[in-house]
Image (cartoon, coloured by chain):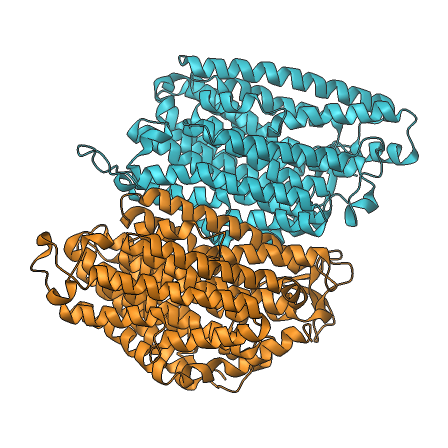
Amino acid sequence: MVENTLYSISLYLPEIVLVVTLCIIIVADLVLKNKEQVIAWIMLSGLATAGFFVIIQAGTVENIFFGMAALDPFATFFKVLLIITGIFVVLFSIKNRELEGYSSRMGEYYMLFTGMMLGMLMMAGATNLLLMFLALEIASISSYVLAGFTKRSLRSSEAAMKYIIYGAVSSGVMLYGISLLIGVTAATDIYAINDAISAGVEQTMMLNISVLMILVGLGFKIAVVPFHFWAPDVYEGAPITIAALLAVASKIAAFAMLIRLFSVSFIDASGLSATGTWSSVEGIHWNLLLGGMAALTMIVGNLTALRQDNIKRMLAYSSIAHAGYILIGLVIMSSEGLTSIMIYLFIYLFMNLGAFYVAMLFMNKAGTESIEEYKGLGHRAPLAGVALTIFLVSLTGLPPTGGFVAKLYIFGAAISAGWIWLVAVAGITTIISLFYYIRVVRNMYFFKPDEDAGRIEFDTLSKAILIALLVPVLLTGLYFQPVLEFARNSMLMFGF
Amino acid sequence: MELNIFGIGILTWIVFIPIVGMIIVLLLPDKNRNAIRWTAAVATGIQVVLAGIIFAFFDRAKLGINDAESFQFMEKFSWITVEAVPWVGRIEINYFLGIDGLSVLMIILTSLIAFIGVISSWNIDKMVKGYFALYLLLVTGMMGVFVALDFFLFFIFWEVMLLPMYFLIGLWGGPRREYAAIKFFIYTFVGGILMLLTMLALYFSVAYTDPATGQSVHTFNILHMMNPANYVDGGLLSGVDTTWRYVAWMALFINFAIKIPLFPFHTWLPDAHVEAPTPISVILAGVLLKLGTYGLLRINFPIFPDATVYFIYFMAALGMISIIYGAFCAMAQDDFKKLIAYSSISHMGIVVLGIAALNTQGMVGGVLQMFNHGIITAVLFLSVGVLYDRTKKRGLYDFGGIATQMPKYTGLAMIGMFAALGLPGLNGFVSELFSFLGAFEAYKWITIISVTGIIITAGYILWTIQRVYLGKTPEKLTDLKDITPREVLMFVPLIVLIILLGIYPAPAIELMNSSLSHLVEFIHGGGM
């Protein structure tokens, strides 16, 4: 444990860079005119610098700031994912037509966005309940405002309102759970909590309740059933760039925190290597509870997605469903399961961002987010059509795309741990998911475009972004060894 | 034996030549249609040549099936290896190709049908570039399945076929193409998920000891999965005659039965056939259906010999039902393509019955029937295609007296018809005979009932000939042009094979005899 603040700061550079970026953006917002593009590039370079420091620090294993946060390969993995997502979403934001009417307030947008990134980066590394909650709130509060950013749109305001009410309630529940947990164990550090629980806790009932409450707060963040109700409305109402951010980055950060908290605090350290049972917190059958949640999430997410016509809503339900698949890894709680979560998130990032991006491009150019109105778009925009097809096929989980590898690992981990019924549910819901994903593809290609509708052309930047998202999706499908090793090594170096 | 061309193994060439063609097609400008067509023709043409080379150099005596040493033209490279970590063991996925007597005929069939399909696609005018790009991707998938010896690779190739097929039916098909395409997609996707789960269960149950390092390695290698010694203690599929092994066998069987298609999983086939454009019907009936029976022989039988023996009556019974049911359904159709679709179900039933006999005769008959049926249905679909191109009609009652108007065409089509009927002297007879002979040894009553299917087949084929080719020509159908040289070109190789294998089937039987005898012994030995 590093108890030297100055040294700790040197290990906290990515977060500090983001704080500095935040300040620069505020100043630039005040000083500059026509600042939209400039600020976007400031944020982009801020993220790139933070990413640079993350990579430089890769491999370091330290517990910094008197045990408040950890810098380990596990955190690095998630920080890399978050920064990649952030960079893509900034690039998306530059061309988002929804945001065009708000050019004077774009400084505010990027400022909040940077704040959210900061919160999420902190979530990936926090090892103390207080810092965890703080980080979560930094990310959440920024995202509430961002969801309602296009304030002249009723939908957007409604989304923000719903999001903040749900968010506030679940944060409150989680905070209550945290306070109970601190009361029961007399510790805030997650390792100390584990020690206290291993040594034996008198009030096991209280302990169980507190863990449940924390699960509610994090379950809200990753949008698992039954804490998912906010997601479709918020995704539909929020600007699509923010929807993408919530569907990808927010989930990644919340999973990072969930994995760290649960596997460090509540699981017997020896359990991680073998069976992954929650030997420490007795009372509730936690694996079964999480398994049930995962199964429900897959079922509800996929079945509801079937009936959606708005592409943002469809993607919202689809990302709820994917949270269910990812949760399977947590049910198993073995290192195999956790590694497969990380592989899944890595691939999910690219394919889901890709789907959101094409949806945004089509909204910009064809002015529609209704899947019914996608008819003929594949013929009018060949590159974007093919790209969306590949992203959706990948989300379905068909080879040779990354989505297949992601599912393969999750399913594999579950089978090897003996969770056959859960895999069966996952398999059946995957088949269901084919219907709604393929419907988009069908509409794009199986209908002729109107006579007067011309070809849709995109600028070079959009094409470059599309290709940058496509390449990892296809590459991870054919040669996934690097991702596998990246995830595995990050998992191996988990904690100390 | 090994055969390299420019340092790359011949099997890699034969699998990936279409992908090269696809890339060239994608780079060519939209308007240059002939260049696109010729690229596809050359790519598949090279495949035919390579298949010829394989046929020439193939060692007929080698066994294959479960013995890695006796596979031919083998290529094995490490694809994904993750070094050991304490609690997982090493992970290994190989790029592992090889052929034995079971696959060699299928490779010849695939390359031939793919080439003929390109010729038959010549008059497709709609989105030519997309069509041929998807077509070539499909060919790679099919060829890959027949040569892959790593389950992971097998699965990838298997699923790669899905999307191109979906688009080929859905974009270039008939009026109800959308329905047919999605039905095909869903059926095969369901099967794919079942196979995926079984594959994973097998992967975690099988670990071989690496002789070099002594490490225990989990592997997708199909040959390692056949060896009972490689199953880990306490693995889900370890042991003999366990419930999970039966479940796994069943999951795989359903996947393959969907492809074959075996009653009651057949309902996608008539729709897909009727709506698909002619060349795609040819591919579908000629090659795709064989993937199902091939999968049974390559995966179900040798990996689960215990479960195979346990379920064999069930399988033979399904084969029988398919034979009879398919034939009766064919009799009831008034759409030419639907008739052939149902006749395919009936004929693939014979394959299933033959291989379910679990003796050499039946197996040889079954695999030969796979090859013969591929060729015969290709001829039948091509003959429907020729008529459809000229008249835009497919109803059996729409035609009549075609023989007087298109004598050359009628001659060729008739040979196909009679081969389907099982006329001695043509190839269909040989393989059906072998299948039934083998099956009779194993199941008397099932075979006796099944053979009545032949009579029904004769009924609907003769009736079709009578309705379409003989009799009076309807007034609207005068001055039809007889077939063009291009169309003759696609018929000739198939017709030659029909007659040749009808008179002298030995070259084909020699190819597979030793492998299949070995497979039979292997199953009866319980995988020893």
Residue at 60% over, 17% down: A166
Q: Position of residue B336 (x, y in %)?
A: 28, 56
* Res B504 visible: yes
Q: Position of residue B377 (x, y in %)?
A: 33, 65
Which quadrant of the view contains residue B520? bottom right
The answer to whether residue B394 shows anywhere in this view is no
Colour displayed for chain B in the image of the structure:
orange
* Residue closest to the far left: B479
The residue depicted at 50 percent of the width and 84 percent of the height is B1
At x 37%, y 85%, the residue is B504
In the displayed structure, does residue A262 sit left or right of residue B374? Answer: right
Q: Nearer the viewer, residue B461 or A381?
A: B461
Q: Residue at x 51, y 57 (%)?
A: B257
Residue B216 relative to residue A30: left or right: right
In the image, the chain rendered in cyan is A
Residue B170 is left or right of residue B210, and the answer is left
Image quadrant in which you'd find residue B516: bottom right
Query: Where's residue A39, x and y in %?
Result: 43, 27
Would you place residue A222 above or below residue B147 in this image? above
Seen in the picture, residue A271 relative to B253 is either above or below; the reply is above
Give whichever of B470, A357 is nearer the camera: B470
Q: Position of residue B46 (x, y in %)?
A: 31, 74
Left or right: residue B315 versus residue B368 is: right
- Front residue of B108/A58: it is B108
The C terminus of chain B appears in which quarter of the rendering?
Answer: bottom right
Frontmost residue, A457 versus B439: B439
Count of numbered circles in the view? 0
